[in-house]
Image: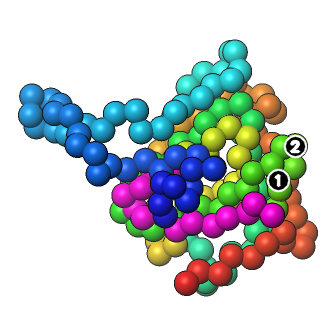
Amino acid sequence: MTEDAYAPYGAVVEAKAAPPREANHGRAEAWDDLAPLVNARQGARPTVSLFRCAPLEGTRLAVRRLERHAHSTQLFVPMNARRYLVVVARGGEAPDLSTLAAFVASGTQAITYAPGIWHHPMVALEAPIDFVNFIHSDGSAADCDELTFDPPCASVELP
């Protein structure tokens, strides 16, 4: 997964090739402003959650569900250094399936979904993964739009 390939859908958050700044009295390095965190809804508050995601069984994902968060960036940070699958599509009220793309992220890459990007729920690949999740929400139906497809709208084969 590369930053350039994923840019239409959000940001890849990882240590960059650019030099970091010194932090914590020389005991740490910091890379700042790696991804925008957008909140387009007054009254929505920053929310941090933990998602425990089960691994994919087999090597094929049938895409039966997509969701989007129209008003907020969503950030996922893996807590276990394992690969995971990211499935995304652009669109408006409905996903544009011609833009559906799949990426394999390393366990050292966090990702964001830009506001309005349709995406499949997180998919661990080798073993369960815990993700820290950040999103602006208010508990209303406007937090998340979901679509279910029967039959599946796409299939993703893992290499």
For image coordinates 61% across by 36% down, the residue present is 73
Which x, y percent locates residue 109? 42, 55
For image coordinates 71% across by 46% down, the residue present is 117
Furthest residue to the right? 150
Disc 2 secondary structure class: loop
Is there CB contact under 8 Å for labels 2 and 1? no
Disc 1 secondary structure class: loop
Furthest residue to the top? 42
Q: Quadrant of residue 24?
A: top left
Which x, y percent locates residue 25? 9, 28
- For label 2, count other residues whose C-alpha is less than 10 Å away and answer few (under 14), some (14-19) or many (20+): few
Which x, y percent locates residue 145? 81, 43
Left/right of residue 129 with respect to residue 30 in the rendered view: right
Furthest residue to the left? 26
Above or below — where is 59 with respect to 115? below
Q: Please, what is the three-letter code of the amino acid marked with disc 1? A: Pro
Q: Mark 1 points at which residue?
A: 95
Above or below — where is 16 with respect to 129? above
Q: Is residue 144 magenta?
A: no
Magenta residues span 98-111
Above or below — where is 56 with respect to 111? below
In the image, 73 versus 137, the foreground residue is 73
Determine if residue 146 is in view: no
Q: Mark 2 points at which residue?
A: 93
For image coordinates 90% across by 69% down, the residue present is 150
Which x, y percent locates residue 31? 30, 38
- For label 1, count other residues whose C-alpha is less than 10 Å away and answer few (under 14), some (14-19) or many (20+): many
